[in-house]
Image: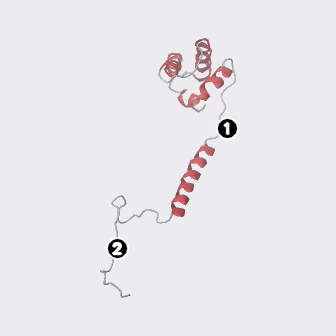
Amino acid sequence: MGETNRAPETVTRVTSSVYPPSLSAPQHPLLAGRLSRVCLLILLTGTALADEASIRIKDGAGKDKVLANCISCHSIDYIPMNSVFLDRSGWTATVNKMVKAFGAPIKDEDIPQIVDYLSRYYGKG
C-alpha cells in the first residue's frame, strides 16, 4: 500500500500576552507549586512574627472584658498603639464604632467597663 503525499503539519506557537517578554509564566507545574509554597511560607512567617503572646496590656478593672471582647476582632496592640490619640470620649466613640459599624459582639453592659479601662490605663493624658 502506497504512501499518500500529505503536506507536512505545521505547529504554530501561541504566545501569551499576559506576561511581558522579559517575564515568563512558570513552565512546569512543579515550579508553580514551588512558587505557591514560597508565598505561603512568607505569609506564615509574617503571622508568626506578629505573636500576640509578647503584647501585654496593663492589669486593672475591666481588663478581662477588654480581652474577652476586643481581641476576638483585632490585635491587642491596637490599644497601646491608639492610646496616644484617644481620651475618654475618643475611646467611647471607638468602642461604639466597633459595635455599631463593625458589628463587634459586645454586650451593652460591658461597654462602660471597657471604656473605663481603656480611658484609665490608655487614655490620652
* SS at mark 1 in the image: helix
Coloring basis for residues: secondary structure
Q: Residues within 10 Å of mark 1 (few under 14, many from 20)?
A: few
| Point 37% across, 60% down: residue | 19
The answer to which quarter of the image holds residue 47 is top right
Side of 80 where 9 appears, left or right: left
Question: Percent position (x, y) of residue 29?
Answer: 51, 62
Pick the front one: 16 or 10: 10
Decide: is 38 above or below 88: below
Image location (x, y in percent) of residue 41: 59, 52
Residue 96 at x, y = what percent? 51, 17
- Badge 2 element: loop
Residue at numbered disc 2: 11
Farthest residue toward the bottom? 2
Looking at the image, which residue is at 53% across and 55% down? 36
Which amino acid type is marked by label 2? Val
Number of other residues with Cα within 10 Å of mark 2, as a class: few under 14, some 14 to 19, many 20 or more: few
